[in-house]
Image (spheres, rainbow, N blue to C red):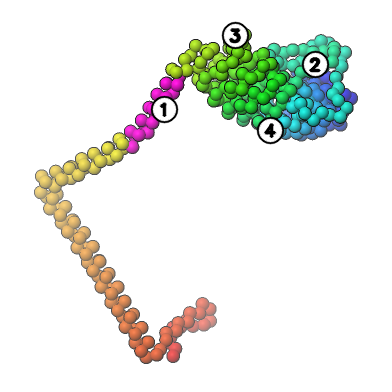
């Protein structure tokens, strides 16, 4: 069996286990059903897959790392599930998308005599349907509307033949990698409704085939890269930068100097706050010590009974400390002198002290002087 299309049949249950034996399967479409559970690890053993669509189901858990073993894969669609975790990092193993490592026997065009809406690809903000002819040469990764976290893996930028990348409506964060500009075949890029931050890479302006870009509703900031390609895209899709309050410069009306000045102002205020906080602390500590000292001085000055009691208290404390120090020093000096005299006596008489300590209860612990 080379193809299996079960889309939009209201099927349920776990991922079909019988597919594990279908190692010659080139096309698998289970989209639009109610399949649930985790995607199996053995999905990476279906080495002949070129088209894999599991979109709009109830799958959850991580995307299996073995999915990067599918070197012939042209189209991966996992949209509209509850998949979580990070995007697999070894996407460079998808050699059919990277444009190197041609497979033996060449590439196969799959032909299906079906309805025109049988096969679908989500690209450029709309769902395109194919059928009734050879599967188009669309090279696509669709992972929107899941719960994916983390950043965009570096291996993704090596997929030079990738035409459509949709990672929208997830929880991805971090910076958009600068190497994304090396995906020279990219026609559609949708990173909207995530948590990406930092600047928009200047390399995006080098994507000459890019005809759709959506970076809206992230935490992007800084000046928007210049370039005729991006300016043209903005005229066609004026909402592509919406929801990023930190972006500035053309084609937006927000002036970068105002944003930078505002940021610098906040930084100066924060720095000033960090500098003044210790100063106020020590100032308050010093003034409190001075006020407390003056309060005690005034009480002793105008309250005779308190003044007498104060000096008597310190006299008693002084006497106790003096007596303790003198007695301790005298006792120590006396013991030291006695030990020195005893040692001198033994050395003059030729005797040597010998001490034996036996821990056994049957023996006597003794200490004696032995010739």
Q: Upstream in the sequence, badge 1 or badge 4?
A: 4
Task: Examine the rendered structure and indicate whether residue 40 appears above or below residue 190.
Answer: below
- Our reading of the magenta stretch's main secondary structure is helix
Marks 1/2: CA–CA distance: 53 Å
Query: In this orientation, which residue lies closer to the viewer: 14 or 19?
Result: 19
Q: CA distance from mark 4 to mark 2?
A: 27 Å
Q: Is residue 158 left or right of residue 173?
A: right
Q: Residues within 10 Å of mark 3 (few under 14, many from 20)?
A: few
Q: Where residue 136 is drawn, which disc sits there?
A: 2
- Between the C-alphas of marks 1 and 4, the distance is 36 Å
Residue 273 colored in magenta in the image: yes
Structural crowding at the residue carrying mark 2, measured as other residues with C-alpha within 10 Å and reported as few (<14), some (14–19) or many (≥20): few
Give the residue at mark 4.
89
Q: Can you tell which of label 3 and label 1 is closer to the viewer?
A: 3
Q: Which residues are magenta?
A: 259-278
Is residue 54 shown to the viewer in this render?
A: no
Quarter of the figure with residue 295: top left
Q: Secondary structure at mark 4?
A: loop
Secondary structure type for disc 1: helix
**Residue located 86% across and 25% down the image:** 106
Pinpoint residue 19: horizontal percent, then vertical percent.
84, 29
- Mark 1–mark 2 contact, CB under 8 Å? no
Between 87 and 366, the one nearer to me in the picture: 87
Report the residue marked by disc 1.
Answer: 267
Residue at x 62% of width, y 20% of height: 204
State whether residue 314 appears in this view. yes
Please give the label number shown on residue 235: 3
Mark in the foreground, 3 or 4: 3
């Amino acid at each position: 069996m080379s193809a299996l299309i079960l889309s939009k049949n209201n099927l349920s249950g776990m991922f079909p286990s019988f597919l594990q034996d279908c190692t010659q399967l080139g096309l698998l479409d289970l989209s639009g059903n109610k399949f649930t559970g985790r995607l199996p690890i053995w999905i990476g053993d279906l080495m002949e897959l070129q088209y894999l669509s599991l979109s709009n189901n109830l799958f959850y858990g991580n995307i299996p790392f073995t999915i990067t073993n599918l070197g012939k894969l042209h189209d991966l669609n996992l949209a509209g599930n509850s998949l979580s975790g990070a995007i697999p990092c070894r996407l460079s193993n998808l050699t059919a998308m990277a444009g190197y490592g041609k497979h033996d026997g060449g590439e196969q065009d799959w032909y299906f005599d079906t309805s025109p809406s049988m096969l679908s690809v989500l690209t450029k903000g709309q769902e395109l349907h194919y059928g009734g002819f050879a599967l188009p040469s669309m090279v696509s990764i669709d992972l929107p509307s899941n719960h994916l976290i983390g950043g965009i893996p570096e291996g993704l930028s090596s997929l030079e033949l990738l035409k459509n990348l949709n990672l929208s409506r997830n929880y991805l964060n971090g910076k958009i990698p600068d190497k994304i500009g090396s995906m020279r075949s990219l026609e559609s890029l949708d990173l909207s409704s995530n948590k990406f931050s930092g600047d928009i890479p200047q390399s995006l302006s080098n994507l000459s085939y890019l005809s759709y870009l959506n970076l809206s509703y992230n935490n992007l900031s800084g000046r928007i890269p210049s370039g005729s390609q991006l300016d043209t895209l903005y005229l066609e899709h004026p909402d592509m930068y919406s929801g990023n309050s930190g972006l500035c410069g053309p084609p937006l009306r927000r002036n970068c100097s105002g944003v930078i000045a505002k940021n610098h102002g906040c930084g100066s205020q924060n720095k000033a706050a960090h500098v003044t906080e210790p100063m106020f602390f020590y100032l308050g500590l010093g003034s409190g010590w001075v006020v407390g000292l003056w309060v005690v001085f005034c009480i002793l000055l105008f309250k005779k009974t308190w003044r007498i009691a104060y000096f008597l208290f310190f006299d008693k404390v002084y006497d106790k400390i003096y007596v303790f120090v003198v007695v301790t020093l005298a006792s120590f000096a006396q013991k030291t002198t006695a030990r020195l005299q005893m040692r001198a006596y033994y050395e003059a008489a030729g005797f040597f002290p010998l001490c034996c300590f036996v821990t056994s209860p049957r023996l006597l612990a003794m200490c004696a002087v032995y010739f």
